[in-house]
Image: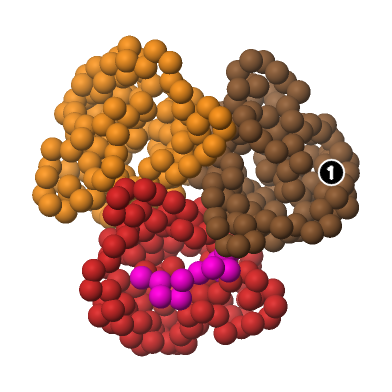
Chain colours: A orange, B red, C brown
Amino acid sequence: MNASSRERIAAFHAAYIRCIGADHLEAWPAFFAERCHYVVTTADNRREGLAAGLIWADSRAMLQDRISALRHANVYERHRYRHIVGQPFVVGDTPEGTHAETPFMVARIMQDGTTDLFCTGLYDDRFDLSGEQPLLLSRQVICDSSRIDTLLAIPL
Amino acid sequence: MNASSRERIAAFHAAYIRCIGADHLEAWPAFFAERCHYVVTTADNRREGLAAGLIWADSRAMLQDRISALRHANVYERHRYRHIVGQPFVVGDTPEGTHAETPFMVARIMQDGTTDLFCTGLYDDRFDLSGEQPLLLSRQVICDSSRIDTLLAIPL
Amino acid sequence: MNASSRERIAAFHAAYIRCIGADHLEAWPAFFAERCHYVVTTADNRREGLAAGLIWADSRAMLQDRISALRHANVYERHRYRHIVGQPFVVGDTPEGTHAETPFMVARIMQDGTTDLFCTGLYDDRFDLSGEQPLLLSRQVICDSSRIDTLLAIPL
């Protein structure tokens, strides 16, 4: 069966957030191409043309470094997080890859059991769909809130 | 590839909420047939057989009017919203179109960055799937909470 | 059209949560095989190897009993709930059925209209996909929070 781009991207998202949810963070960089762009930014920053973002990487190696840092910094992680993604929208094919946008929500579960909406936003992605598995050439994580913790204990 | 009705409706939802999320509200009425029904109501109202709803339109032109009104009323929108839809359920084909139900959640992000669940509910839809793009013949937005702001700054 | 396992499972989830959302609880056991496992547990319990769970059943008949009990116990249900599921991830085929994991969120809507995130977690499922409709051979509902009400008024 020849799955549609949208179906392939939906399956990719499912695998991506499962990786994070299962705390397999060391496997997370493999969802990206070796040369890639990964940015976490806010809707306000983006509107004002601030490209830098809160978190920034331009290679899979930098993503691996980030995970190493997280592992060393967070001796004891107090919270639990739960990602959920909605339906991907395929904007179209571009010279920079297949462009898709997908909304997400992340809940945070405190140690005492209280649960709140930690973060919402949009994945603005460019995919390489030429291989068996989609690869992220570029992911801009655009958080709706401008109050995002730059010491994020998990990837988005 | 001959996509299933469910897949086509899921892709429609993705496009619909992206339109709202990107503040392309002027493009929103084009998701509806020219003669259509759009109602925002509550689960309580519906159970009691109150058909009227909080918001009501029976043509694409009325939806366009609503967007014009929103644009003029909201000189400055203080909040941001994030829609997410779940998996659509195709109830079946009916004389009034393909019947599907899809749960949704909308988060609200305040200016100070706090995020909460603004609204949850169900899209109760009838689609015309005969064209290249699905069109809404009828959408009942059934909000779970009975405390829905009738001055909604965004479409649901 | 030969739908993928992922698509079939996504459609199953849509039907499952619609059944609960529409309060058709008597139809809920039919999503399971006659001999099945249904467990509601917490991420903490599971990590510590506590298999028992908060809620436990090993047959469709036990699930039917549970619904009967709910119907009799909850003379008047004060809250409303809204499930939403994300994208399913198909882990693979196993001797115990097709293994899939799907994140979910449940919102709770109080009588006064306030809405909060009641529960988040993961469906860890084994499906029988051999028939026309998928059947759950096993569902572990792994709640992220350890503060889950064992008197749950709705199935998860």
Residue name at image x 47 percent, y 53 percent: B117
Residue name at image x 54 percent, y 50 percent: C116
Compare residues C75 and C138 and report the one nearer the observer. Answer: C75
Where is residue C63? Give x, y as percent. Answer: 83, 42
Query: Seen in the image, is A20 located left or right of residue A72?
Result: right
Where is residue A142? Give x, y as percent. Answer: 27, 45
Q: Is residue C134 visible?
A: yes
Label 1 Cα neighbours within 10 Å, binned few <14 / some 14-19 / many ≥20: many
Compare residues A84 and B135 and report the one nearer the observer. Answer: A84
Q: Determine the secondary structure under disc 1.
A: helix
**Residues in magenta, as a range:** B142-153
Q: Which quarter of the rendered picture does the C terminus of chain C lie within?
A: top right
Give the letter of the chain under mark 1: C
- Is residue C147 in the magenta section? no
Kind of residue indicated by mark 1? Arg
Residue name at image x 26 percent, y 20 percent: A66
Q: Is residue C85 visible?
A: no
Residue name at image x 79 percent, y 46 percent: C29
Magenta residues, dominant SS class:
loop
Compare residues A54 and B99 and report the one nearer the observer. Answer: A54
* Residue C111 position by quadrant: bottom right
| Residue occupied by mark 1 | C66
Where is residue C10? Give x, y as percent. Answer: 56, 47
A104 lies above or below A36:
below
Query: Seen in the image, is A89 located left or right of residue C107?
Result: left
* Residue B155 position by quadrant: bottom left
C57 lies above or below B14:
above
Compare residues A77 and C96 and report the one nearer the observer. Answer: A77
